[in-house]
Amino acid sequence: MKYFNSISDPRIERCKKHNLLDILLLAISAVMSGSEGWEDIENFGRIKLDWLRQYRPFEAGIPRHDTIARVICRLKADEIEQAFKSWISSLVETTGCDVIAVDGKTARRSFSTKDRKNALHTVSAWSCQHQLVLGQVAVDAKTNEITAIPELLNMLDIENSIITLDAMGCQKEIAKQIIEQKADYILALKGNHSGMQSELEAWWHKVQREGFTEDNYAEYTATDSGHGRIETRTCQQILIDKKWLDKKHQWVGLKSIIKITSDVYEKSTGKETTETRWYISSLNLNADQSLYAVRNHWQVESMHWMLDMTFREDESRIHKGRGPLAFNVMRKIAMGLFKQDKSKSASMAAKKKMATLDDGYRSVLVESGIKMR
């Protein structure tokens, strides 16, 4: 609660019947226990008031759902995000040598046609090592991910980490910022930089014709099987000669090109498919490390899938004020606690059901939020 104590109360003094921290603890605990709306939070509080009073006084009892909604929807976005980031930082002592995947997600039904309000879109930084969202930024309606990503990176200590980004984040200024913050990058290269991709592919074919050497080339292959298919991924990496590149394509820190070829064999149909993806990177030759980083970028997509399937974020109709953002943060707090919990060997969906029914298990989760490192 000390990290969320920094959030300012939007109410005037004479209207503060219920303490703000009481409301926040109630809401976070309720979302962790499966609540999906304001009335669910109120109902949870009335049933579990005795349990809640282990941690906060709740002198005025449980507020009505419209009070909960009114208070939370008026909270400041930057304060919510900073409180979440501060709490996460208390759990993660260092992010060095970590792969941090940065990606955006839209809560599809959080828009409002009446108020002409766009759906909530957030950009999150996912620690593959710690299995936690390290921080997030809500994308302003008049901007996009390209402007939100630098703001997110500024919030984080990314020194010695590898930052992975999809094509949207493949921007010269973002690459420069990552290097200035003493980290490395692997950026997906697609049609948004067609000229640069053409030059890099031409350089690749030139080096291939002349013959790869140990000094400029590395290769690593990994095979996975599951879900009725066998996938073989080959990562090829070469060091780039910047003299070959046009001056406008000579990005800060750029050292290598990465080419990953995925060959998929479907056991049921016998069908074979091949896909090739290109990346630019500030890393030196280490195809094993590069394939690991690119492969682990999917974890942030897995996090988005869990928000939708386990916490039903895409179905949520909450759209007023900062309600969608607050719920998004509370879901990620719950997900972080479930991920870090080792007391139960179960899926996240099963843990959420346990938290709904078992006060003891919910206490383990809440109290682990101040103990884990």
Image (cartoon, grey):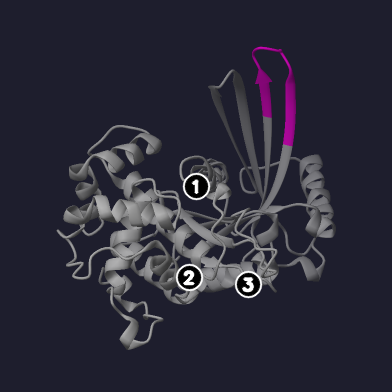
Type of residue at label 1? Leu
Residue for badge 2: 73
Residues drawn in magenta: 263-275
- Give the overall secondary structure of the magenta segment: strand
Relative depth, front residue between 337 and 187: 337
Type of residue at label 3? Asp
Location of residue 320 (image quadrant):
bottom right
Say if the magenta span includes residue 160.
no
Say if the magenta span includes residue 273.
yes
Type of residue at label 2? Cys
Question: Mark 2 or 3 closer to N-term?
Answer: 2
Relative depth, front residue between 101 and 248: 101
Relative depth, front residue between 150 and 210: 150
Secondary structure type for disc 1 = helix
Mark linked to residue 140: 3
Relative depth, front residue between 141 and 294: 141
**Image spot of residue 247 (x, y percent):** 79, 70
Mark 2 Cα-neighbour bin, 10 Å: few <14, some 14–19, many ≥20:
many
Q: CA distance from mark 2 to mark 3?
A: 16 Å
Q: CA distance from mark 3 to mark 1?
A: 21 Å
Mark linked to residue 307: 1
At 38% across and 45% down in the image, what residue appears? 34
Mark 1 Cα-neighbour bin, 10 Å: few <14, some 14–19, many ≥20:
some
Q: CA distance from mark 1 to mark 2?
A: 20 Å
Vertical placement of 304 versus 68: above or below?
above
At 35% across and 34% down in the image, what residue appears? 350
* Image position of 77 (left or right of 30): right
**Image spot of residue 70 (x, y percent):** 45, 71
At 33% across and 45% down in the image, what residue appears? 338
Q: Nearer the viewer, mark 2 or mark 3?
A: 2
* Image position of 69 (left or right of 353): right
Vertical placement of 344 versus 183: above or below?
above
